[in-house]
Structures are given as C-alpha cells and as structure tokens.
Image (tube, rainbow, N blue to C red):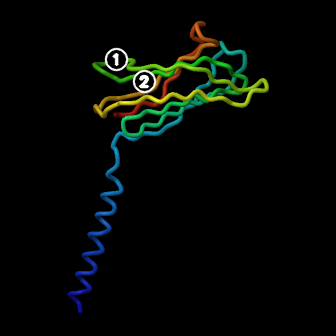
C-alpha cells in the first residue's frame, strides 16, 4: 500500500513539473507594453497620448492612441539596435484623431516577418500636424529583445 502511495505521489509531482514547464515554453520574444507620451509645447493643446506595442511570434502590432484635441499624422517605424545604432527596418503611416466632435480614431500598424535575432527592438513614432508638415514630436516605445 505504501508503495502505491509513493508511486501516485511521484506521478503527481512529475505531472505538475511537466505542466509548469510546458506552460512557460512559449515564444521567448513575446512582448506587450504601453508608454505614455506627454505632448510638447508645439501642440495647441496639452495632453497625453499612448503608444501601445505587442509582439507575437514574427508579427509586431503597433497602436498610437491620440490625446484629446489631437489630430496628427503618425509614422510608426520598427527599429533594431545593430552595431551600437538604432536602424529603421520598416515604416507605416496614417492619421490619428480625437476631439472636435470626432470619435477617437487610433492609428494601427501591423509589421510582419520579424524573426527572433536576439537584438533590441522598439517602435519609433514620428508625429506631424499633417502629412508633409514638419515633425512636431517623436516618441519611442519601450525596447525589448527579439
């Protein structure tokens, strides 16, 4: 009887260890984070915008959430840290708006095909008042290793 209890206990322990090991064996590069961007004095209204980034497998999802009374042309650029410098790999642009009777419209960009190279990665957000105008502000997501 004692032998069967020990066997049952050992089986339970191995099952628990296996479950913990398998549940933690996901993609090591998976990342999700939000960073606040305080608008600088070039904007007509003060406020806080938000930069959301999520990494899932080989895809990077990026969202710029504008502050209230902000109408901006956004360029989101994926950057890798290579040889001591941040290098832009790919960029996507669009508009984000909020206020003046307009329901909040975030800017979303999805970047595909980013392999795990064990390098730092971040998303750079370049903000303009409109397409073609000068840069009013630049913000960066937190960096992570991918």
Instruction: Looking at this view, name the residue that lies furthest to the left.
Output: 3
Query: Which dot, 2 or 1, sits closer to the camera?
Result: 2
Determine whether, in the image, residue 34 is placed left or right of residue 46: left
Q: Residue at x 36, y 57 (%)?
A: 23
> Does 53 appear above or below 91?
below
Q: CA distance from mark 2 to mark 1?
A: 13 Å
Query: Percent x, y for residue 108?
Result: 55, 29
Q: Residue at x 46, y 21 (%)?
A: 77
Residue 107, quarter of the rendered image: top right
Rate crowding at label 1 as few (under 14), some (14 to 19) or many (20 or more) other CA atoms within 10 Å: few
Determine whether, in the image, residue 107 is placed left or right of residue 18: right
Query: Percent x, y for residue 13?
Result: 29, 72
Given contact means CB atoms under 8 Å apart, are the residues at marks 2 and 1 in contact?
no
Quadrant containing the N terminus is bottom left
Residue 78 is tagged as: 2
Rate crowding at label 2 as few (under 14), some (14 to 19) or many (20 or more) other CA atoms within 10 Å: many
Instruction: Looking at this view, name the residue that lies furthest to the right.
Output: 101
Residue 26 is tagged as: none
Query: Percent x, y for residue 5?
Result: 26, 85
Q: Residue at x 35, y 34 (%)?
A: 145
Q: Nearer the viewer, residue 79 or 6?
A: 79
Determine whether, in the image, residue 42 is placed left or right of residue 4: right
Assign a secondary structure to mark 1: strand
Assign a secondary structure to mark 2: strand
Q: Nearer the viewer, residue 145 or 58?
A: 58
Quadrant containing the C terminus is top left
Q: From the image, tell me which residue sits under label 1.
A: 85
Query: Percent x, y for residue 130?
Result: 63, 12
Exactly how many numbered labels are in the figure? 2
Between discs 2 and 1, the one toward the N terminus: 2
Residue 18, quarter of the rendered image: bottom left
Q: Residue at x 61, y 21 (%)?
A: 95
């Amino acid at each position: 009887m004692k032998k069967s209890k020990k066997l049952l206990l050992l089986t339970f322990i191995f099952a628990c260890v296996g479950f913990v090991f398998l549940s933690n064996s996901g993609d090591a590069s998976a990342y999700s984070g939000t960073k606040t961007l305080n608008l600088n004095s070039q904007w007509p209204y003060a406020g806080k915008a938000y930069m959301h980034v999520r990494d899932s497998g080989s895809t990077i999802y990026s969202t710029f959430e504008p502050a209230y009374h902000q109408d901006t042309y956004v360029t989101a650029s994926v950057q890798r840290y290579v040889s001591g410098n941040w290098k832009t790999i790919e960029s996507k642009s669009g508009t984000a708006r909020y206020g003046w009777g307009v329901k909040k419209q975030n800017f979303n960009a999805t970047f595909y095909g980013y392999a795990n190279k064990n390098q730092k990665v971040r998303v750079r957000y370049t903000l303009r008042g409109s397409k073609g105008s000068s840069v009013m502000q630049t913000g960066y997501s937190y960096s992570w290793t991918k």
